[in-house]
Amino acid sequence: MGGKGELPAWVDLGLIPLLNLLLALVATSVVFLLIGENPLEALGIMLNGAAGSIKGWSYMLYYATNFIFTGLCVAVAFHAGLFNIGGEGQAYFAGLGAAMAGLGLEFLPWPILIPLTILASALFGAVWGFVPGYLQAKRGSHIVITTIMFNFIAASLMVYLINYWFRPVGKMAVESRNIGSFDFQQLDLTGAYIPNLRELSMGLFQYRLPSSPLNLTVLLAFLVAWAVWYFLWRTKIGYEIRAVGSNTNAAVYAGIKPQRIIMIAMAVSGGLAGLVAVNEVLGAQHRLLLEYVQGAGFVGIAVALMGRNHPFGIVLAALLFGLLYQGGTELSFAKAQTQPRHGGGDSGSDHPLHGGARAGLPALAHRSFLQAGGLRCSTSSSAPKPCPPPSACRCR
Amino acid sequence: MSVPLILACLAGLWSERSGIVDIGLEGKMLISAFVAAAAAASLGNAWLAMLLAVLVSVGFALVHGYASINHRGNQVVSGVAINMLAAGLAVVIGNEWYKEGGRTPPIPFEAQFAIINLPGFDLLSGTPLIGPYLKIVSGHSLLVYVAFAAVILTAWALAKTRFGLRLRAVGENPHAVDTAGISVALLRYKAVILAGILCGLAGTYLSVALQGSFVRDMSGGRGFMALAALIFANWRAWPSMWACLLFGYLQAVGLRMQGVKLGTFEVPVQFINMLPYVLTVVLLAGFIGKSIPPRASGLPYTKDR
């Protein structure tokens, strides 16, 4: 490797991420200064908005749920030496599975229906991940490009499907009809409705939580994070995935078929992204609507990198990004109130700083974690080695 | 439609031939489209706008270079980070400056590139048969000609100059280049800067010449299509141009075909929009055969191995 000595683990795992985070904050501050805002004030609003109230915490956990799924999605592919940028499209397409099962099988009682819809979401996500995996393994198409193309294809396809298939006749909004319902006073659950934590606490304990989209899927996320750890480090397939990712030649020599592993890894990866649909379609929105993934697929890349592709790290990173997201949203609301309302053009629903703060902050945070990638490969040999693009692996 | 594709594709060509995978074409195009639009709208000069856009794009390219050459970071990751950063920054700054949800105001006509009519073509355009076709060749803005000139220059420089030879070598076998006493890092930096310049031109064309303003995410995956074209063309200049022309043609067909009916069945717009992406996938999967990337592309170079 790089020839430098190994750094102690606490430096590698604790100090460097912290320094990177500080660097990201400094970089963000520069942007804030450039556009004439006080970075400290902004940071204060962000932290207070995300961690200063139960409502903030709920939103943070709700965002983190998505990021755990997408982060795991990227990590599983990464362990196989694949770079899956398609989490966004896989999560979006999975909504189709969630809605089809949730609406088409709604005669079933919920204890059967909810697991079925979760499976359907994962299955549709897996299909959208498997196809690029197949093309990579059998046809040698570059996985990065195919997954990006699949993001675009999913975006167009879903607009069409929601518009022509799912939208009830005579309704203007481009969305499906509601999936399931939950009467929390009677605790009467029908259909594929994953209950909101607020409704649950009202129904069970008569305790009033502030309203938020946080729902039971968050528990699923933690469970799945553990399952992914078990899958990667305790099962045969998981071992084979990691073997292919760290050294394809050695894996072949050991009798592992990389093509098969690539397809499996991509399907699992897509399935994990697909669980975002459970959180969004079944848990938060209770209907299928346009663009509900909102960039979670791309944030997953940053989350996976920051979490060092380990489920535990990913959960922590997802919480941090949840905080950034929720804080960023609070910030844009706070700033929108102090400034005159700007003519929003087509982005009528967006607050002026909203999209920017959301897109910009994670990107900046991400930016410096890239440096962690750089540092990582020169200082430590135990961490997963940044992989060459799959096409390069395959041509040996 | 093909011009930004060609420019971006050549940018990818230079970068990847030197061994630096560049997923960040999209981001560099986007940020330079934004800078160009903003500069053209406020300064009223297309040339100044182009210069600024190229500078910013080169800046982003250098960040990518720094991460992947000096720090030996994962080049794909670095490129994706650049894409995210560009998309975020363009919207944040655009909002702050113009308060229009990330757009820039329309660029005044005098700040756009003038149409250049090739000398002599006006006389010929009256002639029957070839007259109408001459319009394809003449009457474009300068960047169109720059793009095609860049193809010729790239093909020539890669094949015939010492710089081109060394650059190709560094993408295939950096150890040999290093042994010959040439700096691998410097060569790669040069390639990355070239890619930055070309992406800057592509972005400028997108906002100043094609659209007349900047809207968020206006590059719409062109950077990735350029990469697909590059793979399709097997990392060579002339085939890249043909591949980009093909993709550009598909995009144009997509725009034209909206609302077309096949028999009684009206093709939904969404399917037309999907067409270029689907075809990219199909082309990548089916008709390329084995494409061989430069051997060392994506691999960071360490001296002491």
Image (cartoon, coloured by chain):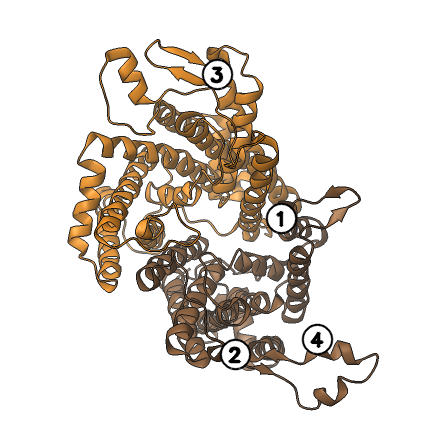
Chain colours: A orange, B brown
Q: Secondary structure at mark 4?
A: helix
Q: Earlier in the sequence, mark 1 or mark 2?
A: 2
Q: Which residue is mark 2?
A: B113
**What is the C-alpha distance between the residues marked 2 and 3?**
59 Å
Mark 4 chain: B
The reply to whether residue A357 is visible in this rendering is: no
Give how far across and how far down residue A119 sits, in percent.
51, 23
Q: Is residue B122 left or right of residue B10?
A: right
Q: Which residue is mark 4?
A: B136
**What is the C-alpha distance between the residues marked 1 and 2?**
31 Å
Q: Are marks 3 and 1 in contact (CB under 8 Å)?
A: no
Q: Secondary structure at mark 1?
A: helix
Q: Earlier in the sequence, mark 1 or mark 4?
A: 4
Q: Quadrant of residue A131?
A: top right
Q: Are marks 1 and 4 in contact (CB under 8 Å)?
A: no
Q: Is residue A165 left or right of residue A350?
A: right
Give how far across and how far down residue B8 sits, in percent.
54, 66
The residue type indicated by label 1 comes to Met
- Quarter of the image that includes the C terminus of chain B: bottom left
Mark 2 chain: B
Question: Which label number is shown at residue B274?
Answer: 1
**What is the C-alpha distance between the residues marked 3 and 4?**
60 Å
